[in-house]
Image (spheres, grey):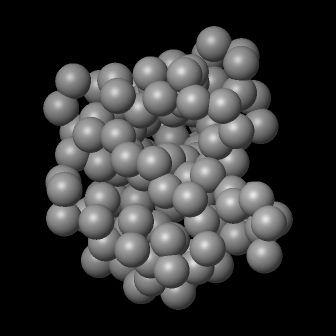
Amino acid sequence: MVKTKVLVVDDSATVRQQVSAALGQAGFEVIEAIDGVDGVNKIARIPGIGAVVCDVNMPNLNGIEMVEQVKANGANPTLPILMLTTEGVPALMQRAKQAGAKAWITKPFKADVLVSAIRALTKAH
């Protein structure tokens, strides 16, 4: 069985590790990126990414800017992106949705909620 690839974009190594562990145990192949610039590059370079889990507050290129760039280039119009962040500000959530994000989960997160959301977004498992 081919595993669905999920890109985890977060500047916190701890959060990347927690998300990777939860998704890996659920049968996903996890790829990590350290910020929005790294995320954009990996989405462009690595074929077959099925979903993205992305933080909002990151250096170099924040998560919403990353979503805007990914969606603006037109190469990945259907790529589902889930925002995973400490932010719960409605204006930010609306901007992310307008940019193309499909879901929003606030930290701290429950692993089962994250896995369920990614499964729903990728129609996996």
**Residue at 28% in and 35% down:** 35
* Residue 100 seen in the figure: yes
In this rendering, the answer to whether 124 lies above or below 94 is: below
Tell which of 21 and 94 is nearer to you. 21
Tell which of 86 and 111 is nearer to you. 111
Tell which of 91 and 104 is nearer to you. 104
Residue 68, position in %: x, y? 52, 25
42 relative to 15 in the view: left or right: right
In this rendering, the answer to whether 111 lies above or below 99 is: below
* Residue 93 seen in the figure: no
19 relative to 86 in the view: left or right: right
74 relative to 41 in the view: left or right: right
Residue 104, position in %: x, y? 51, 61
Residue 46, position in %: x, y? 57, 30
**Residue at 34% in and 24% down:** 37
In this rendering, the answer to whether 118 lies above or below 8 is: below
Image quarter where the N terminus lies is bottom right
Residue sitting at the far top: 73
Q: How many marks?
A: 0
**Residue at 49% in and 56% down:** 30
**Residue at 70% in and 70% down:** 119
Tell which of 52 and 6 is nearer to you. 6
Image quarter where the C terminus lies is bottom right
123 relative to 106 in the view: left or right: right
Residue 36, position in %: x, y? 35, 31
Quadrant location of residue 9?
top left
In this rendering, the answer to whether 94 lies above or below 118 is: above
